[in-house]
Image (cartoon, rainbow, N blue to C red):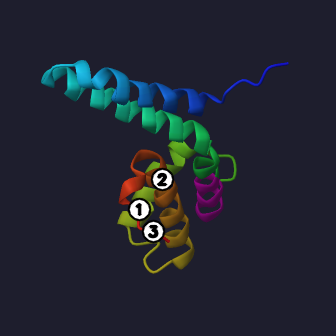
Amino acid sequence: MSERPALGALLAEAQRSLLQALLPGLDEAQRYQARMIASVLGIAAREIDAGPEAWDRLETALRARLGQPEARLDSLLPRLAETIRAGAWDGDPALYEALHAHIRARLAVANPKVLPED
């Protein structure tokens, strides 16, 4: 039985090949497009490797904070925005920590270079 590489690893290899093997032979306009494609491949690879845990944690935290145990994240986020604008969560450290952790997890996928070293 052969080992199958993870999808994230395959995307990362496609990104590496695009940048190292193909990019040098492209004209400037094509290089820009290739770098955009490589960026998307990197984000997709990190998204797959990270899994849905960050979204699941945020959904669980918001369900508890908003008292809506059956709600889905897409309906919780607008409700959260409304309550934040109304000042309902001002000074709430638990909500701050949940949102901070979620933002860090999302940045680790979308743009890990902006995160400070711990």
Three-letter code, disc 2: Ala
Say which of 89 and 98 sits in front: 98
How would you classify the magenta stretch by its main secondary structure? helix
Which callout, 2 or 3, points at the residue further toward the start of the chain? 2
Q: Nearer the viewer, mark 2 or mark 3?
A: 3
Q: Which residue is mark 2?
A: 108
Q: Which residues are magenta?
A: 57-66
The N terminus sits in image quarter: top right
Check whether the beta carbons of the residues at disc 3 and disc 1 lie within 8 A of each other: yes
The circle drawn on residue 117 is 3
Q: Residues within 10 Å of mark 3 (few under 14, many from 20)?
A: few
Three-letter code, disc 1: Leu
Say which of 112 and 69 sits in front: 112
Q: Percent position (x, y) of residue 66?
A: 58, 60
Q: Which residue is mark 1?
A: 115
Residue at horizontal 41%, vertical 58%?
82
Q: Nearer the viewer, mark 3 or mark 1?
A: 3
Three-letter code, disc 3: Glu
